[in-house]
Image (tube, rainbow, N blue to C red):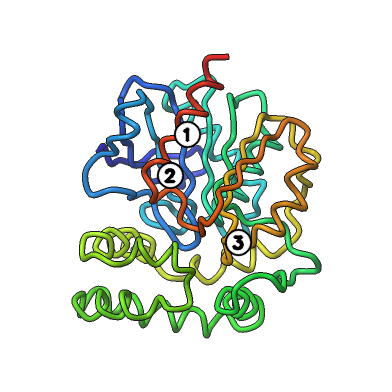
Amino acid sequence: MKDYSIDLKDGRKIGIAEYGKPDGIPVMFFHGTPGSRLLYEGDDEVSMKLGVRLISLDRPGFGESTPKPNRTLLDWPDDVEEVADSLGLGRFSVIGVSGGGAYAAACAYKIPNRLYSVALVSSATPFVNGKAPQTMMRANKIAFFLSRKAPWLVKMSYKAQKKLLEEQPVKFMQHTKEGNKHLHEWDRQFLQTDEQVRSLMMHFGEAFKYSVDECANEPALLSKPWGFSFGDILAPVDIWHGEEDQMAPVVEMKKHAPTVPNGEAHYIPKAGHFLTDDEKIWEAILQTIKEKCSE
């Protein structure tokens, strides 16, 4: 794993972690909400095997990336293009997971000529009138509501999590294992072992590194109008979604997916939200990207 940052023209910086093959097929990865560029403690064997250069980016205010006040979804493609130019990349692919799917969709809309393909994995979808869909799990609906109406309360909650993670990591690990009963059974399997929880702690610890502000702000941002529709997207898009996903409800994605002009949907039976934690599904996602890069 290679960990570094890139300075942007406006004085901000973007934190980056690279996995896989250094001279492989360039694929940018956009984390969920909250999240960070750090995906693995070591390298990603699947990326290495398939010859993929996985370039994972911190969004503004997460990890090593400088905040960007009043940012919008459509600001992100500009940062992505600047990173690509700094790395000497002409065309590349992007993957957006969960909340990061909205940012991948923004790139598919705004910079389609730079992209070989786009993968939306367990992706968020646009809200209607700023309200989370009724089919979303209760805990997530509450989080989105509070992010809009009482962001100070969300920040307080994340500050408590941050303090627990930093000062009592064993207790944080125990709470994580015991406090996931609200998740679908398929998702709970990825939060069972100490190794799995340590990986989550690394990911979240980096997300909270600068501050917890963006962890509270981003859900409100995602619930606002995106500035485009799925029907406006011109880049090739592969949609990957679990049929049992309750965090980003599959019902909502099934409304939007057919409107993508150059889209293909892959719905995974019995699967929940954490698709990239399943090695076979992760390999299928990267293999599909690899094939589209060679077309």
Sooner in the amino-acid sequence: mark 2 or mark 1: 2
- Mark 3–mark 2 distance (CA, rounded to whole Å): 21 Å
Residue visible at 39% across and 38% down in the picture: 6
Give how far across and how far down residue 135 sits, in percent. 68, 70
**Residue at numbered disc 2:** 57
- Mark 1–mark 3 distance (CA, rounded to whole Å): 28 Å
Up-down relation of residue 59 to residue 33 (above or below): above
For the residues carrying marks 2 and 1, which lies nearer the camera in this image? 2
Determine which quarter of the picture holds residue 292.
top right
Is 267 left or right of 128, judged from the image as shown? left
Confirm or deny contact between disc 2 and disc 1 (CB under 8 A): yes
Residue visible at 72% across and 51% down in the picture: 254
Q: Which residue type carries mark 1?
A: Val
Q: Quadrant of the C terminus?
A: top right
Residue visible at 65% across and 76% down in the picture: 148
Give how far across and how far down residue 236 sits, in percent. 66, 29
**Residue at numbered disc 1:** 83
Say which mark, if any, is on residue 248.
3
Answer few, some or many: residues within 10 Å of disc 2's Cα (few below 14, many 20 plus, some between 14 and 19). many
